Amino acid sequence: MPLNLSSIHIPSMMVTTFLTLVGLICLDTVLGMILAIVKGTWKWNQVGHFLETSVLPYVTGLLGLAFLALLQPSMLPVFYSSATAAAVKFVADIVSKINSFGIQVPEPKTTGGDSVTTSTADTTTK
């Protein structure tokens, strides 16, 4: 029995998530290329290897998860959590590359209590 693709509904949130992540991957890749050119470490013969090992695994992996989630909707949380983890990684890489250009990206301000606390009450004397 052939698979009828016209009966598969693709959630718009899934499309938006996928395209956002692809955009982050492209931005990270372009910034990395610019940074390599500026530093003088750019090598054209390494571009294919870089794309094969650092870009395509994320895109194809997420595309595979999206396809599985379309076939089995219970996989949607796996798709979204994987996309979120990859997005966090690429945002951190982008911020790091921007900082490498000498542009300081401010750290986000917390709205709650600090997660790291120091105590000055532990001053014991001997």
Image (cartoon, rainbow, N blue to C red):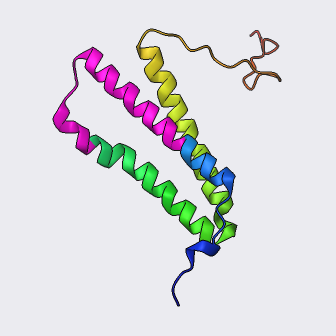
Q: Residue at x 57, y 79 (%)?
A: 4
Q: Going by the image, does 110 lie left or right of 78?
A: right
Quarter assignment of residue 86: top right
Horizontal and vertical percent position of residue 91: 54, 31
Please, is residue 6 above or below residue 60 in the view? below
Is residue 15 found left or right of 27 in the rendered image?
Answer: right
In the displayed orientation, state which residue is furthest to the front: 6
Question: Does 113 appear above or below 46?
Answer: above
- Point out residue 66 in the picture as x, y percentages from the top left corner: 56, 60
In the drawing, does residue 9 fall left or right of residue 28?
Answer: right
Observer-nearest of 46 and 118: 46
Please identify the quadrant where the C terminus is shown: top right
Question: Closer to the camera, 84 or 30?
Answer: 30
* Residue depicted at x 57% and y 41%: 20
The question of residue 107 being in magenta is answered with no
Image location (x, y in percent) of residue 123: 77, 11
Magenta stretch in the rendered image: 21-49
Taking the magenta stretch, the answer to whether it contains residue 44 is yes
Q: Which residue lies furthest to the left in this view?
A: 45
